[in-house]
């Protein structure tokens, strides 16, 4: 990645004109953030392409960045309205097998975190949370489809601040489409998922995050159901987790610094 792709802006000049220009840029960034969050809360038009606030699996797939990532990665979509019950806490075990743009340098990185599915309903809604190394990211509504033991989840998370491993003032909208198979022992096997950054914004004039929009990475692996036998993370797992980027946010923070 060339050094000018995403870089820290130079210190603000002390001239009146430069201060005025900086003020305008910061105000514009606040307007962008306001537009993003208001777009997630308003009633969409029928032909609107969303970057957040998805109301159905079809709306996820309608987003061009999401559909393009699915086509390029070959992540399967399992149809049906009778998915298995996957509620539980899992230890993820896998790696990043493909990525686009500035995330390409992360191919081959391990994926190790606690991933929680909860509040799965008969109307096929589901919530999630991911945790590692004192950081966490929660969902803002999601869906599940599939039949018998196969399923696909459609998840969304708006992440910001140090809790998500991001610099102050930086916010990203993350979409994850993930498919897998619920095994008889409770584990999730044949996991293939693509995570897409559908939007990014910054109210901090030190960071330019425009190159994050539309980038994606693919994971492959399995989710191991936490039970009484494996409820505590071993010393080796703990070391691996602490050295692994959480949802790639640690690595992203290094990129945009």
Image (cartoon, grey):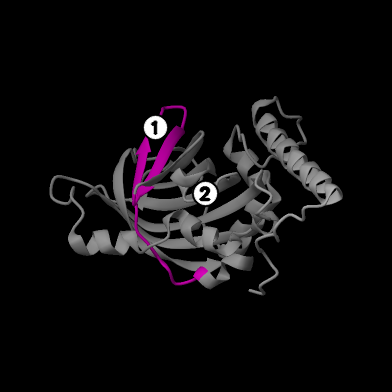
- Front in this rendered view, residue 160 or 63: 160
The residue lying furthest to the left in this view is 229
Q: Residues within 10 Å of mark 1 (few under 14, many from 20)?
A: some
Q: Which mark, by number, is residue 172?
A: none
Residue at left offset 18%, top offset 50%: 232
| Residue sitting at x 64%, y 67% | 101
Q: Image quadrant for the C terminus?
A: bottom right
Label drawn at residue 120: 1
Pick the front one: 143 or 104: 104
Farthest-out residue, bottom: 2
Name the residue that disc number 2 marks.
176
Q: Give how far across and how far down residue 132 sits, in percent.
A: 35, 51
Is residue 100 in sight in this rendering? no
User: Percent position (x, y) of residue 248?
Assistant: 48, 58
Q: Position of residue 116 (x, y in %)?
A: 35, 42
Q: Between disc 2 and disc 1, whose residue precedes?
A: 1
Residue 14, percent from left and from top? 77, 52
Magenta highlight range: 106-133
């Amino acid at each position: 990645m060339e050094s000018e792709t995403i870089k820290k802006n130079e210190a603000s000049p002390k001239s009146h004109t430069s201060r005025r220009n900086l003020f305008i840029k910061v105000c514009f960034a606040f307007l962008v953030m306001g537009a993003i969050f208001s777009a997630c809360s308003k009633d969409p038009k029928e032909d609107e392409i969303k970057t957040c606030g998805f109301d159905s699996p079809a709306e996820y797939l309608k987003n061009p960045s999401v559909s393009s990532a699915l086509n390029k990665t070959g992540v399967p979509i399992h149809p049906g309205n009778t998915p298995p019950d996957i509620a539980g806490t899992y230890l993820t075990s896998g790696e990043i097998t493909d990525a686009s743009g500035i995330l390409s340098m992360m191919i081959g990185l391990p994926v190790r975190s606690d991933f929680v599915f909860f509040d799965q309903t008969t109307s096929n809604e589901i919530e999630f949370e991911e945790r590692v190394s004192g950081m966490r990211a929660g969902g803002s509504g999601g869906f599940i489809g599939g039949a018998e033991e196969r399923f696909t989840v459609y998840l969304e998370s708006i992440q910001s601040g140090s809790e998500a491993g991001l610099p102050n003032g930086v916010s990203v909208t993350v979409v994850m489409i993930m498919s897998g198979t619920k095994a008889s022992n409770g584990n999730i096997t044949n996991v293939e998922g693509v995570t897409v950054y559908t939007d990014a914004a910054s109210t901090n004039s030190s960071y330019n995050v425009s190159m994050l929009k539309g980038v994606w990475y693919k994971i492959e692996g399995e989710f191991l159901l936490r039970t009484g036998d494996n409820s505590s993370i071993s010393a080796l797992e703990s070391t691996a987790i602490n050295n692994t980027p959480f949802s790639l946010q640690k690595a992203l923070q290094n990129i945009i610094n």
